[in-house]
Image: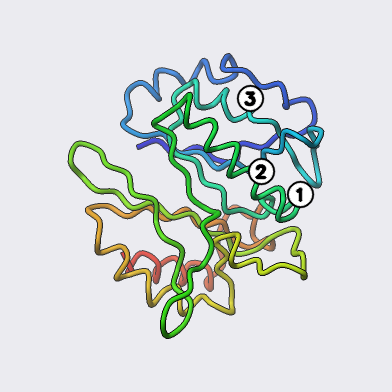
Amino acid sequence: LTFLGDYIPHTGLHETTPEAFERLLPLFADDTLTFLNLETPLVESAPPAGFPAFNAHPPFLAAALASGVEVVSLANNHILDLGAAGVSATRDALVELTRRYPELRWSGVEGWREREGGAAIPAPRELSVGGCRIGFLSVTQFLNRWPREIAVEELVNLVDGRNRERFLAQLKSSAEEYGLFILAYHGDAYEEYRRSAESAKAALFERLLAAG
């Protein structure tokens, strides 16, 4: 398994082509799955934009897919940069890209589900490799934009102080359904650029590991 970091269209990078990944191709060719964090909405009807509110068009992601990326994480602080319409357009763009890249899978915009007794954690995306069932779930702890007029948790896989304990309690039973469970956890803004985690974050990740 290969895990890439943030794929984000800063100014001048919107026209990214597969050639940008050329030096990584041997790595991708030798792995089974390549994961990438897409840190931007994909909205064809809006112009490309860089910091602080990003947007890219589908060819930006297609360049990575054509190079061998198969799994995309969407839950991060920029997914709502263009609001609820941007999330919907991104989801539609991914569905369309799946026609060209049928191996594409993603997680991050399923949202919390209603069930008897309270909300249920977002459904993991199931991957199957060599007969092994792999669960993949992408969540984020914070968002740069938080439209108060929408129910954010119904759009984005958000796990913060209000629902973290519920998430941890349900994560174990969800992870137990798979031979391998992969969680993409996008952390808080305070520690985003630090080289080491504070004790509270380290303790949280220990709890996530214990949950499977």
Give the SS element for disc 3. helix
Badge 3 crowding class, 10 Å Cα cut-off, few under 14, some 14 to 19, many 20 or more, is some
Tell me: residue 165, above or below residue 15.
Answer: below
Badge 2 crowding class, 10 Å Cα cut-off, few under 14, some 14 to 19, many 20 or more, is some
For image coordinates 29% across by 49% down, the residue present is 134
Residue on which the image places disc 2: 89
Tell me: residue 20, above or below residue 54.
Answer: above
Q: Of the residues shown, which amino acid type is indicated by label 1?
A: Leu
Residue 53's x, y, as percent? 79, 46
Q: Of the residues shown, which amino acid type is indicated by label 3?
A: Pro
Report the side of 137 relative to 1 (left or right).
right
For image coordinates 34% across by 37% down, the residue present is 1
Cα separation between marks 3 and 2: 14 Å
Residue 100's x, y, as percent? 48, 24
Q: Nearer the viewer, mark 1 or mark 2?
A: 2
Can you tell which quarter of the image residue 212 is in? bottom left
Circles 1 and 2 in contact, beta carbons < 8 Å: yes
Residue on which the image places disc 1: 82
